[in-house]
Amino acid sequence: MKSYGEVKNLPFKNLNGISDKTIDIHWGKLYQGYVKKWQELQERLKEGVSRDLKVEESFLADAVVLHEAYFDILGSDGKPTGSIINAIAKDYGSFEEWTGHFKALGIASRGWVVLAYDFNDGKLRNYIADAHNLYGVWGAAPIIVLDMYEHAYFIDFGSDKKSYIETYFKNLDWKKIEQKFNKIVKN
């Protein structure tokens, strides 16, 4: 199992419609910066624990987890496939209803939109988080993660969140999403 203190490799080479510059800043500086801050925080925690340090720890841990989940499922043609499509339709009425709900949350979100498997009731649920460590649900595992912070889209799309979300969907790797879903549901 990988530690929060280790940088993962970028799991794709190029994305359609999301520039290398955006990826270089987002993955190369921001995500890797969170990993480095996590490492530094672990050293500070050896000197003593405080509320502020533990809040920072949850912020950094979630920043690493959410960024990795975001990057891990990108890099393909965006064609939905797999048993997760049926599971989404079961919990949302149809795949199209889920897609509309997820995209609407993207427009409304200040930070993240997450399709998670909620172990509390065994359903797929869309959640939002305005910050890495706000509004997370204990007992829910992220499957599809959309970063709605401006650093993820502003260079390429300006304030046009809708176009960014559409481009994100066109780059989803549903085989990777299916693998993640199957791993989570089987545990």
Image (tube, helix red, strand yellow):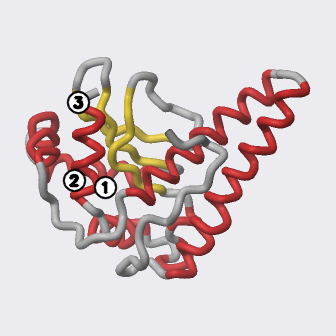
Residue at x-position 73% and y-position 52%: 36
Provide the secondary structure element on which disc 1 rests. helix
Label total for image: 3
Q: Nearer the viewer, residue 141 or 95?
A: 141
The residue pinned by badge 2 equals 99
Spot the residue most to the top. 120
Give residue 5's quadrant in the image.
top right
Viewer-proximal residue among 176 and 98: 176
**C-alpha distance separating marks 1 and 2:** 6 Å
x, y percent for residue 40: 81, 44
Q: Amino acid at mark 3?
A: Lys
Name the residue rendered at 38%, 80% in the picture. Answer: 17
| Residue at the outermost front position | 1
Pick the residue in front: 179 or 128: 179
Disc 3 marks which residue? 186
The residue singled out by tag 1 in the image is 103
Label 1: few (<14), some or many (≥20) within 10 Å? Answer: some
Q: CA distance from mark 1 to mark 3?
A: 27 Å
> From the viewer's perspective, is residue 161 above or below residue 96?
below
Q: CB atoms at circles 1 and 2 under 8 Å apart?
A: yes
